[in-house]
Amino acid sequence: MMGYIYKIYDFYAEGFRNMKLGKLLWCIILLKLFIIFFVLKLFFFPDYLNQYGEEEEKQEYVSSELIQRANSN
C-alpha cells in the first residue's frame, strides 16, 4: 500500500518539478484565492458578533436577526 502512495506522490512531484507555465498558473490561482478569502472578507464582511462580549448576547443578536429577516420576507 505504501508503495502505491509513494508512486503517486512521486508522479505528481516530478511533474510539478518539470512544469514551467504550470507553476505560473498555480501562483495566479493561489493569489486569487488569497484575495477572495482574506482581502474581500476584511472589507466586505464585517464581524458583527465581535461587538458582543457574552455568548448569550451573541445568541440573542443572531436570533433577533433571523426572526426579523424571516418576517420581512
Image (cartoon, rainbow, N blue to C red):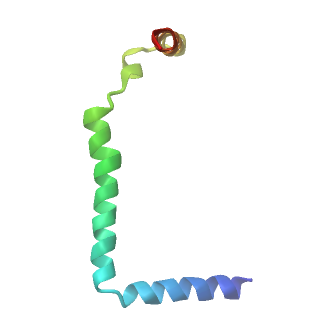
Q: In which quarter of the image is residue 26?
A: bottom left
Quick one: 32 or 38, which is closer to the camera? 32
Residue name at image x 41 percent, y 14 percent? 52
Q: Percent position (x, y) of residue 15?
A: 44, 88
Q: In this view, does 56 lie to the left or right of 37?
A: right
Quick one: 66 or 47, which is closer to the camera? 66
Q: Quadrant of residue 39?
A: top left
Figure check: 42 above or below 5: above
Figure check: 8 above or below 57: below
The residue lying furthest to the front in this view is: 73
Figure check: 63 above or below 43: above
Q: In which quarter of the image is residue 17?
A: bottom left
Q: Percent position (x, y) of residue 28?
A: 28, 66
Residue name at image x 52 percent, y 10 percent? 67
Q: Is residue 24 left or right of residue 73?
A: left
Q: In this view, does 44 lie to the left or right of 56?
A: left
Q: Percent position (x, y) of residue 18?
A: 37, 91
> Which quadrant holds the N terminus?
bottom right
Q: Percent position (x, y) of residue 63?
A: 53, 12
How many numbered marks appear? 0
